[in-house]
Amino acid sequence: QVQLVESGGGVVQPGRSLRLSCAASGFVFSSFAMHWIRQAPGKGLEWVAVVRYDGSVDYADSLKGRLSISRDNSKNTVYLEVKSPRAEDTAVYYCARLALNHYSAFDLWGQGTMVTVSS
Amino acid sequence: DIVLTQSPGTLSLSPGERATLSCRTSQSVNSNFLAWYQQKPGQAPRLLIQGTSTRATGIPDRFSGSGSGTDFSLTISRLEPEDFAVYYCQQYGNSPLYSFGQGTKLDIK
């Protein structure tokens, strides 16, 4: 079954690092660029970061320096570390697959994992 | 930075009616790199349209996309009850690398 399953969310204290995971199955994970996209409660979608098939990465400018995205192709898993989270990082975090065509759209999404930053 | 502005913010229509949603961008977007998503409460977004007008796999043909440059639209020809949701446009290639509009909520009149 082609799917993405996120984990690692929950309540985290401000300043304590958090690592999210996204396990992929049903497709050739190593061929795809993988992204994290987040959605604050009641708000729209915000692109966060990408790790491409070759391991290169990019981040949203507003989040650079506080995030680290990585992948482990042997485990079909992509990770997002949020360093020193703040209240404004509270959101549902989705991992998403970039379609393997020339359109640069996200054709597969996980169900999301909720992160609440609170003391 | 590029800004995607969707209108209207909320669209109230009845099943069977035609819906037209707009996405205007502050900079020109390559038509290959404009997509539309549908999101229902408590669910992840679902890809509807990629490359401005190409339906994703399994998307019914009542959904269509069009546009170019800075002006794009999503049309639902005859609304079904399951179409009432929030819709987002998304671009690639400008700064930021990927970005979304703020969404249009389509609700039942």
Image (spheres, rainbow, N blue to C red):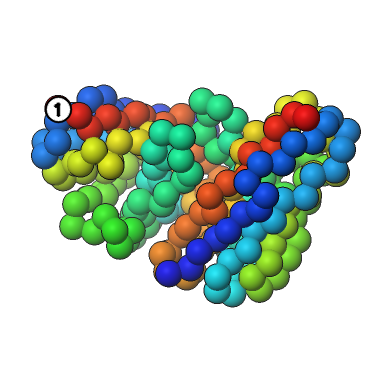
| Residue A4 shows up from this direction | no
Q: Nearer the viewer, residue B64 or B17?
A: B17
Q: Is A13 displayed left or right of A88 in the figure?
A: left
Residue at 20% in and 41% down = A86
Judge the density around disc 1: few (<14), some (14-19), many (≥20) Cα neighbours within 10 Å. Answer: few
Q: Is residue A103 above or below residue B94?
A: above
> In the image, what residue occupies the spot 79% across and 35% down?
B13
Q: What secondary structure is found at the residue carrying circle 1?
A: loop
- Where's residue A99, x and y in %? 54, 52
Q: Which residue lies at the image location 79% right of the left edge and 39% below the top edge?
A: B60
Q: Residue at x 79, y 44 (%)?
A: B19
In the rendered structure, which amino acid carries the disc numbered 1?
Ser
Q: How many marks?
A: 1
Residue, far left: A15
x then y, percent, for residue A63: 26, 55
Which of these two is toward me, B92 or B13? B13
Q: Position of residue A33 (x, y in %)?
A: 42, 53
Q: Nearer the viewer, residue A73 or A51?
A: A51
Chain letter for mark 1: A
The residue where tag 1 is placed is A119
Q: Position of residue B9 (x, y in %)?
A: 63, 46
Q: Is residue B16 left or right of residue B21?
A: right
Quarter of the image with the C terminus of chain A in it: top left
Residue A95's image quarter? top left
| Residue B14 visible in this rendered orientation of the protein | yes
**Quarter location, residue A94:** top left
